[in-house]
Amino acid sequence: MRKKLAAGNWKMNGLKASLTEVEALIAAHPAPACEVLLCPPATLVSAMAALAAGRIAVGGQDCHPKASGAHTGDISAAMLKDAGASHVILGHSERRADHAETDALVCAKSEAALAEGLTAVICVGETEAERDAGATLAVVGRQLAGSVPAQATAATVVIAYEPVWAIGTGRTPTLEQIAEVHDFIRAELVGRFGAEGDGVRLLYGGSVKPANAAEIFAVSNVDGALVGGASLKAADFGAIVAAL
Ligand code: PGA
């Protein structure tokens, strides 16, 4: 039985004052039936983890493949862990696009995260042009094969399917399209990792909001969501947590 996961990705949003949203979320959902994870900018990981005190999980949004060294502006998995993170988002399409991250780099970062005991939330997803060309499953399959490390387990890796064209656009795939990709990802993981692959949580991400969360959560092989914009407000993210 896979435990459901509601994950929020604050992206490059949030100042110390934003932590009141976390307080409000925890106050409104003191004992959620699912796992709840928030990934703020690195500057807030420590303060959010202290505030959450284990009641929700806190994660980073990226890490470097190396443990330390001369890499100005980067952050290591050990640093995130030291700040109180238990998870890290890796290979988000915005990083793949803005920082030219390849599958091999995402895989190396995931290995670094696992080596520190962080759970890697590895993102995959096609662009609109790729979907229009009928290449969705080929693209997602290639990203999965290249980005998910060999040592992945159900406890240490979460996969987020995030169609690039659905992120921040208010557009979502049909429920059939979500099911098709999630069923495909499940089959790929089982093919590669056997029973362990059956335990890996699969999140849908891209314009999840209170109004569409419940129907998306009812789709086969959807074990939760990775939520951007709607995770910034306690009321919206709380409604998604409740739907899950
Ligand atoms: P969105 O972002 O919910 O704002 O579409 C999702 C994501 O990029 O993780």
Image (tube, rainbow, N blue to C red):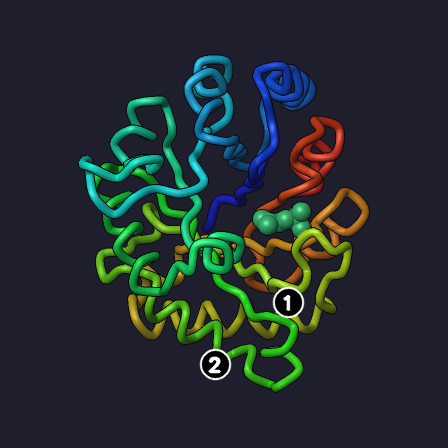
Q: Classify 49 as above or below 149.
A: above
Res. 22 visible in picture: yes
Observer-side mark, 1 or 2, equals: 2
Amino acid type, callout 2: Ala
Q: Could you tell me which residue is drawn at 59 percent across and 78 percent down?
A: 130
Q: Which residue is mark 1?
A: 178
Toward the viewer: 16 or 197? Answer: 16
Q: Could you tell me which residue is drawn at 77 percent across and 54 percent down?
A: 170
Task: Indicate which disc, 1 or 2, sits on the residue closer to the N terminus.
Answer: 2
Measure how far apart labels 1 and 2 are at the Cα level. 15 Å
Query: Which quarter of the picture shows residue 70?
Result: top left
Res. 225 visible in picture: no
Amino acid type, callout 1: Ile
Q: Could you tell me which residue is drawn at 33 percent across and 38 percent down?
A: 74
Residue 6, position as x, y percentages in the image: 57, 41
Q: Which residue is mark 2?
A: 138
